[in-house]
Amino acid sequence: MAKKNYYDILGVTQGASGDEIKKAYRRLAMKLHPDRNPDNKDSENKFKEVQEAYAVLSDDKKRKLYDQLGPDGFENVAKGGGAGPSGFGGGFDNVGDIFGDIFGDIFGNARSGGGAQRNRPERGHDLITHVRISLEDVVFGTTATIKVPQMINCTECGGTGARKGSKPETCKTCGGNGQVYIQQGFFSMQQTCHACHGTGEIISDPCHKCHGRKQVQIQKTLSVKIPVGVDNGDRVRLTGEGNAGTKGAPSGDLYVEISVLPHKIFKRDGLDLYCDVPVTFVGATLGEEYEIPTLGGKVKLKVPAGTQSGKVLRLSGKGIKGLHGGQGHLFCKIMVETPVNLDSDQKELLRKFDELLAKDRKKHSPISKGWFDGVKDFFSKFSK
């Protein structure tokens, strides 16, 4: 069976840059990590595939050799079934050295204690959660209560994974290194120890609470202070509120990502706010002062006489205070409201009013004059 392509495993093209490969690896590793997928054998196997693929493609020398030989050729050489020293141009004094270099990072390096590194203290994983807040919360700040699933060290066994009164034993197969050597002809390779799965220890009597996993999941309730001026996508970090570390290492951090709910009256653009303000026909014509809401309370808005529908008036400093300083404005779009459901007397008065305006339409309707003049010029081109 053909071996799966490392590029396909990471979901990148063969011409992907080192940064693209690293980004893809981090995304998949976080998604498939055994801590996040307990008792999921399929996820564990995929996680190992991703680690193996990244170990090769992140190293320029290994990647070049992989690209030259292809997935099957690369694996055949690793198993000792391919070319000998001459297959690499005769440029290496010791065949075992090159394969130790090529495959050492895939399975860990037993010579340098790579297996033991998996058994050393490790910082806990960071977590991310989301919280939705109102626009008012953005203006005044708030404190949100959130519930987060979190991995903590098992209190029953103290994070050892072994039943109380017992302790893990050093793996006899690998001597605690987490790696074993396999000799095949000229080649000496190292692999993750099958007995301890690379941990370097055996738990013969597992803890009944965590079943040997050393950590358990809890639902933790936290209060997070949301500062004034946050925007969609901003994150608040809670240091040490991520998953617990192992063997005394610090916990990871929790990132709370902000989503701001839509508002019924205001729309936001950065620190500025926008709203529509309906005014009467008479108010727009004669000018009038209107009381309008802002997120800081009611204010007076002076609409000048002769204001046309669609005109935007600015109220300075009535927007949002920035997270890092600055103050936005409130922009009010005037919407002249056309009267509806008129009775006969009201309609008659409007007709008489319109007749009075008609005596000097150009003076009273500057927008109409400009528009009709443009239409006249447009049609004149066709009459020539």
Image (cartoon, helix red, strand yellow):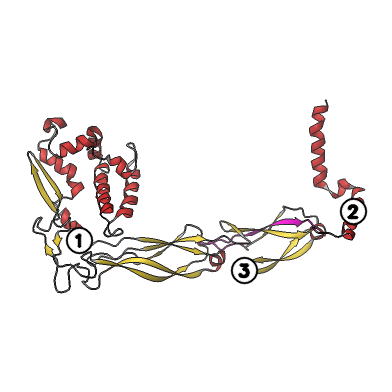
Q: Which residues are magenta?
A: 319-340
The image quarter containing residue 129 is bottom left
Tell me, yes or no, whether the two marked residues, 2 and 3, touch with CB atoms within 8 Å. Answer: no
Task: Give the mark nearer the N terminus: 3 vs 1.
Answer: 1
> Would you name the residue on which mark 2 appears?
351
C-alpha separation, residue under disc 3 versus residue under disc 1: 54 Å
How many residues crowd mark 1 within 10 Å: few (<14), some (14–19), many (20+)?
A: few
- Residue at point 47%, 57% (across, down): 233
C-alpha separation, residue under disc 1 versus residue under disc 2: 89 Å
Q: Is residue 39 above or below residue 374?
A: below
Q: Is residue 257 within the magenta segment?
A: no
**Circle 3 — which element?**
loop
How many residues crowd mark 2 within 10 Å: few (<14), some (14–19), many (20+)?
A: few
Q: Nearer the viewer, residue 279 or 325?
A: 279
Q: Nearer the viewer, residue 284 or 42?
A: 42
Q: Main secondary structure of the magenta part?
A: loop
- Residue at point 32%, 47% (across, down): 22
Left of 26 or right of it: where is 277? right
In the rendered image, is residue 239 in sight?
A: no
Q: Is residue 7 above or below residue 280?
A: above
Q: Position of residue 61 (x, y in %)?
A: 23, 38
> Would you name the residue on which mark 3 appears?
296
The residue type indicated by label 2 comes to Arg
Q: Position of residue 118 (x, y in %)?
A: 20, 57
> Would you name the residue on which mark 1 appears?
120
